Image (tube, rainbow, N blue to C red):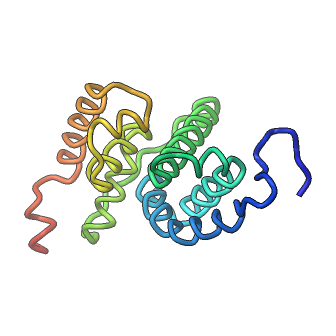
Amino acid sequence: MPDNGRGSEAPEGFPAPASFEIFAQASQRRLYRTAYLLCGDTDTARDLTQTTLAKLFQHWRRASAADHIDAYARTVLTRTYLAERRRRLQDLLAHSRPAPRPAPDHADLRVTLLSALADLPPRARAMVVLRYWEDQSVESVAELLNCSESTVKSQCSRSLARLRARLGEAHIYTTGS
């Protein structure tokens, strides 16, 4: 491939495309799972995963030099999600307010939880998914999202309170009544 002047091409003899392919195959499912939890939609999650992998490929020399390539990829995924949500939110606000989603009546817990997650703002949703689903520390979530640890703590606390209020009593969903 010709050099495009951005310095993203690998030097001769360096198997960057092959190592990227190995990374992409190994991490695609994990990235998709996180993307699905962030987006709540299979098609959007696929697009987000592919966009993330494309960005990683474009800057593979820098990405492959990272100490923790999985954390680097998760950061790219999360920031891409948030940037896309900001763009979509600006478009929505410019045109009209969307109607609130109806609460599911007797839906499966997973569907109910995804619906409740969808009601959270994008950044708060990203914090909850990274902190509790991905089991990341407060420090790593703060670093991923470029914010303070106290912001992560307070946003997660508020978001969990909103989820609890939205979901009601937990035993209703776990006992099947």
Q: Of residues 100 and 56, which is closer to you in this image? A: 56
Taking the spot 22% from the left edge, 43% from the top edge, the residue there is 160
Residue 174 falls in which quadrant of the image?
bottom left
Taking the spot 59% from the left edge, 42% from the top edge, the residue there is 84
Q: In this image, 31 relative to 21: left or right?
A: left
Taking the spot 34% from the left edge, 40% from the top edge, the residue there is 140
Instruction: Pick out the residue farthest to the front.
Output: 13
Residue 19 point in image, percent of width and height: 63, 65
Q: In this image, 113 relative to 5: left or right?
A: left
Q: Is residue 23 above or below residue 150?
A: below
Picture quarter with the N terminus: bottom right
Q: In this image, 129 relative to 68: left or right?
A: left
Residue 5 falls in which quadrant of the image?
top right
Residue 30 falls in which quadrant of the image?
bottom left
How many numbered callouts? 0
Picture quarter with the C terminus: bottom left
Residue 135 point in image, percent of width and height: 27, 53
Q: In this image, 137 relative to 119: left or right?
A: left
Residue 108 point in image, percent of width and height: 27, 71
Q: In this view, does 98 lie above or below 148?
A: below
Residue 158 point in image, percent of width and height: 23, 34
Instruction: Pick out the residue farthest to the right.
Output: 2
